[in-house]
Amino acid sequence: MLRSVNDLKGFKIVATDGEIGDVEQFYFDDERWTLRYIVVNTGNWLSGRQVLISPFSVMHVDREHRKLQMTLTQSQVEKSPEIDIHKPVSRQMEAAHAEYYGYPYYWSSPFLWGAEQHPVPAPQQSAAATATATPHVAALNTTVPPMAAGTRAEMHVLSDDVHLRSTQEVASYFIAATDGGIGHAEDFIVEDDSWTIRYLVIDTRNWLPGKKVLVSPQWISLIDWAQGKVHVNLSREGVKQSPEYDNSRLIARDYEAQLYQHYRQPGYWAEQKP
């Protein structure tokens, strides 16, 4: 199912033994266009501290009650590595975060999530079993082979070449077609099982009043991070004639097929394994 990232904001983050905060925003990987971390505002519980939670820990998305059920305990989250979201996220920080929770390194694999195309949730554990993070980490690390010192994989893990971006920041970027502006990014549409960003929602109100359209990351030719501008390999006329996006409805495959046919592009679902 495809979901709006804006709709996920404010969802309660629920550990196995109680709530830990609300969804504030996300960090996504701008190479594979996948949500990698949930930024959680812990409110009064941790004196306003913000923490990162990986989709690896999401056990269930309760859309009706606006909750994300986690496999973690409050103690695990409380003792997690400190994060300063006002600074760029380093690979060393990601490695420390992964090692603490026992996640595989997604960036050292040809698959989206380590050995899988989807983030397989960690097994749920009791508060007693997770009084410290050690049992949880040990259990998960048995599936992740250690890397020999000096290998290319290790150097990649410790590289500063990190491609994490804030959805909150990019959701205001200007969007330019090959022959002029078409509007600004307003939202992201994400696939809920792989956490892959399938579309940017573009608000064209200053050009096509009232119309919103979807653009696939596959059609982006350049992102100017310094100027806050996304260039798409589409014409203004093509965008003008594209199927309109209605955010009051779930996105159906028929609509997606119509969109891709309009731009004469193969659907991403054709490349997915059954």
Image (spheres, rainbow, N blue to C red):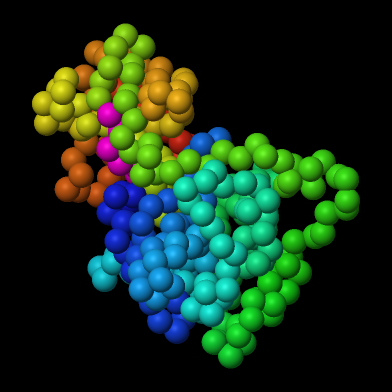
Viewer-proximal residue among 245 and 84: 84
Name the residue furthest bottom: 128
State the image coordinates of residue 117 (x, y, percent, origin top left): 58, 51
Viewer-proximal residue among 197 and 23: 23
State the image coordinates of residue 226 (x, y, percent, origin top left): 45, 25
State the image coordinates of residue 147 (x, y, percent, origin top left): 83, 54
Q: Is residue 223 left or right of residue 93?
A: left
How many numbered marks have been drawn onto this rendered protein structure? Answer: 0
Name the residue furthest front: 47
What's the residue at 29%, 50% (across, down)?
A: 6
- Region rendered in magenta: 184-189
Q: Is residue 194 visible?
A: no
What's the residue at 79%, 43% (across, down)?
A: 155
Residue 205 position by quadrant:
top left
What's the residue at 65%, 37% (across, down)?
A: 161
Relative height, residue 182 to residue 74 (above, below): above
State the image coordinates of residue 110 (x, y, percent, origin top left): 67, 43
Relative height, residue 68 to residue 239 (above, below): below
Relative height, residue 172 to residue 193 (above, below): above
Q: Is residue 158 left or right of residue 189?
A: right
Name the residue furthest right: 149
Q: Is residue 68 left or right of residue 93?
A: left
Q: Is residue 155 visible?
A: yes
Viewer-proximal residue among 45 and 174: 45
Q: Is residue 38 left or right of residue 248?
A: right
Secondary structure character of the magenta stretch overall: strand
Residue 180 position by quadrant:
top left
- Give yes or no for residue 130 being in the magenta stretch: no
Name the residue furthest left: 209
What's the residue at 54%, 43% (across, down)?
A: 88
